[in-house]
Image (cartoon, rainbow, N blue to C red):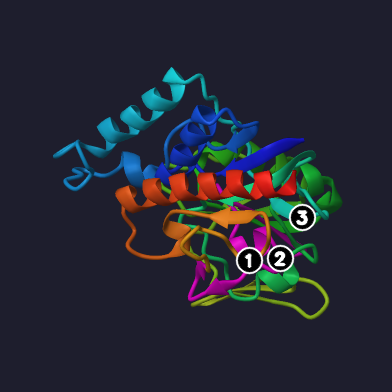
Amino acid sequence: MYDIAIIGSGPAGISAAINAKILDQNFIWFASLNVSKKVGQAALVKNYLGLPDISGEQLSKAFLDHAESLGIKPVDKVVNGVYSGGNCFTLLCGTEDFTAKTVILCLGVDTAEIEGEEGLVGRGISYCATCDGFMYRGKNIAILCTDKRFEHEIEFLCSVANKAYVLPLYKGHEIKSDNAEILVKSPIRLEGEKRLEKIVFKDGYLEVDGLFILRSSVSPSILLHGLEIKEGHIVVDRAMRTNINGVFAAGDCTGRPYQYMKAAGEGNVALHSAVEYLAQLK
């Protein structure tokens, strides 16, 4: 049982993790081993306080060096679901689960769900290859992937399926399975009554038995049901509290401006709010 679970690789997540360490909190930080691509790919950052005219690559290294200097190590797992259980939350990562008293969501804004996705989760749509892959043995599936690091999961799914339509939303894919057909297009809508029936594109549709969506993070409304969302962003107050007690959010997922300085500040605020919330539980 952790006191705080932090989800996110960007400045908000790193800021929350660093401050959790400084305040000697019992926490777990779910993040990729590298800072978010949005930071690392920036050509030049001119408005980060104290670090003028720094490249995104240099800023990413500074963030990671700071965390490593404090002995902070991220857990490189994708959280597929967060479920409330009274005074604690269960976080599912594929076939593993973790428990925490509070959760800080630092999810960024690259997790936009597809129209119809939320209503079909668990009814033909899955986010975990190892959890649900064998349910589709010998069937026709589609795999939408946003990150090259999940290609081993694509290969696994191809090995159990009869036919796999792969939709890689990134460049430089290296998918070699004989039963994989690469489709360079993005779905605009998912349709089905009791289960997923069609993946709709601008130029047609695809009928499959299931769709696996492999993202670095899951859309907030799907990750945690009941979370208040407005215009695509998590609704928070000045203390970064959401409408669910014990859940806080920070960074781009809470709205504009999408800036590193703002995200880092909100991560700090969210962590302190979580600490205050934990004190009230005692």
Please tell me in which quadrant of the rendered image residue 42 appears: top left
- Amino acid type, callout 3: Tyr
Residue 253 in the magenta stretch? The answer is no
Q: Residues within 10 Å of mark 2 (few under 14, many from 20)?
A: some
Element under disc 3:
strand
Circle 1 residue: 221
Query: Is there a contact, CB below 8 Å, between mark 2 and mark 1?
Result: yes
Q: Is residue 46 above or below residue 24?
A: below
Q: Nearer the viewer, residue 134 or 275?
A: 275
| Among the two numbered marks 3 and 1 on one chain, the one whose residue lies closer to the N terminus | 3
Q: Secondary structure at mark 1?
A: helix
- The residue shown at (64%, 50%) is 277
Q: Quadrant of the C terminus?
A: top right
Residue 180 percent across, percent down from the top left: 63, 49
Please give the range of residues in magenta: 208-234
Name the residue carrying label 2: 225
Location of residue 221 with respect to 181 vertically, above or below? below
Residue 81, placed above or below residue 13 = below
